[in-house]
Image (cartoon, rainbow, N blue to C red):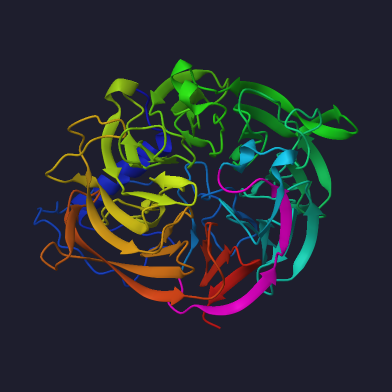
């Protein structure tokens, strides 16, 4: 079994110590007004030993310090950080920036298989996953936003003014990632913004010069390099996934099925441009069980780090565990569905895997896996969602989950996960609490545990990922709304759903919607929150800053 990183074991030990002493640890983002929980009547020693430990601070720990704040899709290497509160409970339009629209090939979710002969369409605004990155430079916040107009933008987060725009060959659907030069980590002029686009219609799928994943200098918007995407059995050469930043290197997945470990600051010539140095690579196209997928072997998700492995979901139906250094496949969990969404790693060393309803007999939904166990024993629970024919989908979860791990510093809150499904609903579940009934799995497996449902609300369906920040959830989707929900915690007899916290105590959980923004169009992009502002792009052609004016 793989051991947790030492700092995680240190934090766990401190949490147990604090529980025995009857005190709560605090960090900068703990809410002073959080309702108290009932604590067991444990005798407290009259003399406590002195323990001094310096905890590592994540780069986001001081929201007012300069630096990279939201580095990649879902914030960090575990995909579990979504911004800094407070979360606004009033949603005025503080500003909106025009993104406009651009042309691309084909229509719908499966448009990756379209060729030039398939016709061209125009899309507006921002799409899936479409979450902005965030940098604070000289005391001022800047957003990095990719749009359907083929443009990557640096936007002043206070005013909505575009600082620069870099032109791609096609629409940008994914989320940018930002990396600092290890030779000058505090110099914003050396930051690189990495993101991809669709392949560049009307180019043929077999064209030799397709390189949609690119590095752009944060300071100037000038191109640094472009990474070629080879032609494989996959019907796509797009790049939708967001890079995983690991120190001076990045792990990048592209839709040909390749996963690369690159050095973004070492380049070499390529067809009149520069290309980053590829240090390692793996090709993940499944096995003979994916024959029914045809060319739909697309790797759209973003890689996630857990321990010394990188995990990535593949359209071939597998969740792969790769050695983080060599990218050798060490673990392979087969589901069989087209897996689009990004896997999230939890603080208790589990994986949350969104499952689409496609190529499988059962429902889609969300699987929790324990990758410390062999794949055949790895299922912890499955939460099925309803089937629904909507656009090109039949059900399941296309986006990702969010978790409250980064917003529960003292372990007094139950571990929660939030996700939105094609069936129309936002779901919130208690990850550590299983129901008395069991469910069938994605392929009809019988007797799987399922988590307790805390809350469910109809939002029209979504491929956007809802985010949990402090004691709030922000969720948007095809109901043309951005919704804010407040999570309230209390003693077990306070009403609501009761679940166990990390500390072992039990608490009640209530969720209620407290704000709704009905402007704009549909939402496929994932929002971020930063100090009283919600930032999100819409399919109406605009990018929005919402909050109290």
Q: Residue at x 36, y 59 (%)?
A: 26
Q: Residue, x 76% and y 35% (percent of image)?
A: 211
| Count of number-bearing discs | 0
Q: Is residue 102 magenta?
A: yes
Image spot of residue 507 (x, y percent): 18, 59
The percent position of residue 244, horizontal first and vertical second, equals 58, 39
Range covered by the magenta-colored residues: 86-109
Image-based side of 186 in relation to 459, left or right? right
Image quadrant of residue 508? bottom left
* Above or below for 390 versus 342: below
Give percent across and percent down for residue 367: 33, 38
Between residue 32 and residue 117, name the one nearer to us.
Answer: 117
Q: Is residue 385 left or right of residue 198?
A: left
Say which residue appears at 68% left-offset and 50% top-offset. 172
Q: Nearer the viewer, residue 466 or 26?
A: 466
Q: Residue 486: percent from the left, percent from the top?
A: 34, 69
| Residue 134, quarter of the rendered image | bottom right
Lateral position of residue 109 relative to residue 120, left or right: left
């Amino acid at each position: 079994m793989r051991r947790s990183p030492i700092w995680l074991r240190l934090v766990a030990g401190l949490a147990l110590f604090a529980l025995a002493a009857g005190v709560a640890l605090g960090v900068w983002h703990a809410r002073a007004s959080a309702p108290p929980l009932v604590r067991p009547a444990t005798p407290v020693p009259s003399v406590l030993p002195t323990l001094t430990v310096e905890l590592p601070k994540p780069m986001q720990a001081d929201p007012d310090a300069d630096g990279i704040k939201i580095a990649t899709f879902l914030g960090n290497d575990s995909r579990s950080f979504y911004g800094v509160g407070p979360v606004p409970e009033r949603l005025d339009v503080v500003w909106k920036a025009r993104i406009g629209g651009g042309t691309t090939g084909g229509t719908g979710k499966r448009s990756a298989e379209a060729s030039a002969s398939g016709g061209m369409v125009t899309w507006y605004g921002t799409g899936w996953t479409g979450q902005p990155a965030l940098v604070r430079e000289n005391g001022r916040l800047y957003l990095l936003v990719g749009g359907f107009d083929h443009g990557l933008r640096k936007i002043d987060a206070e005013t909505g003014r575009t600082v620069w725009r870099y032109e791609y060959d096609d629409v940008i659907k994914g989320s940018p990632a930002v990396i600092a030069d290890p030779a000058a980590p505090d110099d914003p002029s050396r930051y690189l913004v990495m993101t991809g686009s669709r392949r560049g219609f009307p180019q043929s799928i077999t064209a030799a010069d397709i390189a949609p994943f690119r590095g752009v200098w944060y300071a100037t918007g000038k191109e640094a390099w472009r990474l070629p995407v080879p032609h494989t059995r996959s019907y796509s050469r797009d790049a939708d996934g967001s890079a995983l930043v690991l120190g001076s290197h990045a792990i990048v997945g592209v839709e040909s099925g390749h996963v690369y470990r690159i050095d973004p600051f070492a380049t070499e010539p390529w067809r009149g441009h520069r290309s980053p140095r590829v240090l390692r690579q793996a090709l993940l196209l499944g096995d003979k069980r994916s024959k029914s997928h045809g060319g739909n072997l697309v790797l759209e998700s973003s890689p996630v780090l857990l321990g010394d492995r990188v995990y990535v979901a593949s359209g071939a139906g597998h969740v792969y565990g790769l050695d983080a250094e060599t990218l050798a496949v060490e673990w392979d969990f087969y589901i069989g569905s087209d897996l689009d969404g990004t896997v999230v790693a939890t603080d208790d060393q589990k994986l949350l895997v969104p499952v689409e309803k496609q190529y499988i007999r059962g429902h889609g939904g969300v699987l929790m896996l324990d990758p410390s166990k062999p794949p055949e024993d790895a299922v912890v629970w499955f939460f099925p969602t309803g089937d629904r024919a909507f656009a090109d989908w039949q059900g399941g979860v296309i986006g990702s989950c969010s978790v409250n791990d980064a917003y529960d510093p003292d372990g007094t809150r139950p571990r929660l996960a939030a996700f939105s499904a094609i069936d129309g609903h936002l779901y919130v579940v208690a990850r550590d609490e299983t129901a008395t009934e069991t469910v069938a799995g994605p392929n009809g497996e019988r007797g799987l545990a399922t988590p307790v449902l805390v809350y469910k609300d109809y939002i029209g369906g979504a491929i956007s990922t809802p985010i949990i920040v402090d004691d709030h959830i922000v969720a948007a989707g095809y109901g043309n709304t951005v919704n804010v929900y407040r999570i309230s915690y209390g003693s077990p007899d306070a009403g609501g759903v009761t679940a166990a916290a990390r500390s072992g105590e039990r608490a009640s959980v209530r969720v209620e919607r407290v704000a709704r923004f009905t402007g704009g169009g549909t939402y496929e992009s994932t929002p971020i929150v930063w100090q009283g502002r919600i930032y999100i792009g819409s399919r109406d052609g605009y990018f929005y800053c919402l909050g109290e004016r």
